[in-house]
């Protein structure tokens, strides 16, 4: 990972990769696929063009981390957008449908393979699709609908909050901000992700109280109920997840 090469290669990239690696090593999780963009460009590392890359477990010496055929965590790079050019996330919006088509093709193919490996006549479909950031959230929402698979979303940061902060600075008009950051398309994607997701994962209280509250689909009543459950020490552990797909 070329961390810090631009505004799109910061801590979120490392966070998502390490999350996939950690989930892939969890008991009860057979496989995790991290779907991202394949880039074959001279100004980025050659590994960005590799269609599949296996993520090694944290502790390769621990026999408990032994995995079966096709098990573990993988980076799956889907070709979409300009084939030989690295572009910023703001320019990827028109290419989201192409990514979804490629991701769907991969999921169908690997699900059939995994089904055969476990001795099933039916494909082994993902148990969840987890979108990170707005563009991946939009993609995950579309995949969730097609596959009828529950969606999880982590926003990391939200467009409505960024828009308000930029407007407060007074350096750009709303139109200029939208032209630079495609902010309205991002906000629309986050609203879609909020509507479709069964679980929203947040990192801080500030994200709940000052960012998600700005979204049209946010339900403060539900939020209060969740807080009440946390106070009563009700845990949020779910069922075993044999396979998960993540998009970044």
Image (spheres, grey):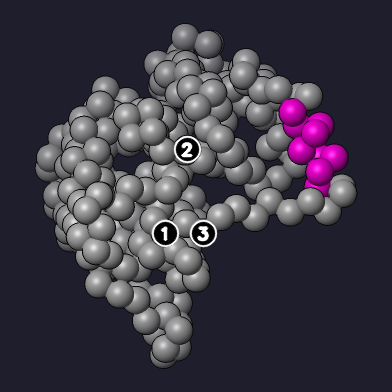
Which SS does the magenta portion mostly show?
A: helix
Q: Are marks 2 and 1 in contact (CB under 8 Å)?
A: no
Residue bearing the label numbered 3: 240
Residue bearing the label numbered 2: 151
Residue 167: where, in percent of width, then height? Answer: 61, 17
- Is residue 136 part of the magenta span, yes or no? no
In-front residue for pair 38/163: 38
Q: Residues within 10 Å of mark 2 (few under 14, many from 20)?
A: many
Whether residue 13 is visible here, answered yes or no, is no
Q: How far apart are labels 2 and 1 at the CA level?
A: 15 Å
Residue positioned 83% across, 53% down in the render: 233
Res 194 quadrant in image: top right
Residue 66: where, in percent of width, then height? Answer: 37, 81
Q: Residues within 10 Å of mark 3 (few under 14, many from 20)?
A: few
Total label count? Answer: 3
Residue positioned 30% across, 75% down in the render: 68
Q: In the displayed structure, would residue 117 be above or below residue 35?
A: below
Residue bearing the label numbered 1: 242
Q: Circle 1 — which element?
A: loop
Earlier-in-chain disc, 2 versus 1: 2
Range of magenta residues: 222-230
Give the number of the mark in front: 2 or 1: 1
Q: Circle 2 — which element?
A: strand
- 179 lies left or right of 204: left
Earlier-in-chain disc, 2 versus 3: 2
In-front residue for pair 50/34: 34
Q: In the displayed structure, would residue 243 be above or below residue 149?
A: below
In-front residue for pair 132/177: 132
User: Which corner quadrant holds the N terminus?
Assistant: bottom left
User: Which corner quadrant holds the C terminus?
Assistant: top left
- Is residue 223 part of the magenta span, yes or no? yes
């Amino acid at each position: 990972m070329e961390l810090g090469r631009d505004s799109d290669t910061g801590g979120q990239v490392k966070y998502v990769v390490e999350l996939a690696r950690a989930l892939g090593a969890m008991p009860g999780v057979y496989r995790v696929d991290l779907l991202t963009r394949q880039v074959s460009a001279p100004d980025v590392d050659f590994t960005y063009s590799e269609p599949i890359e296996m993520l090694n477990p944290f502790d390769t010496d621990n026999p408990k981390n032994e995995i079966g055929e096709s098990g573990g965590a993988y980076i799956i790079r889907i070709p979409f957008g300009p084939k030989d050019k690295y572009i910023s996330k703001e320019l990827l919006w028109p290419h989201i449908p192409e990514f979804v088509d490629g991701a769907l093709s991969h999921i169908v193919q690997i699900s059939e393979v995994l089904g055969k490996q476990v001795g099933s006549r039916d494909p082994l479909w993902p148990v969840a699709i987890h979108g990170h950031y707005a563009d991946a959230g939009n993609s995950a929402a579309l995949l969730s609908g097609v596959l009828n698979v529950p969606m999880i979303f982590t926003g990391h940061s939200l467009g409505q909050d960024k828009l308000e902060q930029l407007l407060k600075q007074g350096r750009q008009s709303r139109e200029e901000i939208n032209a630079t950051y495609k902010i309205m398309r991002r906000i629309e994607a986050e609203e879609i992700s909020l509507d479709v997701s069964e679980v929203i994962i947040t990192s801080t209280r500030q994200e709940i109280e000052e960012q998600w509250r700005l979204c049209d689909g946010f339900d403060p009543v539900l939020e209060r109920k969740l807080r009440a459950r946390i106070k009563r020490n009700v845990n949020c552990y779910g069922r075993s997840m044999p396979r998960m797909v993540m998009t970044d």
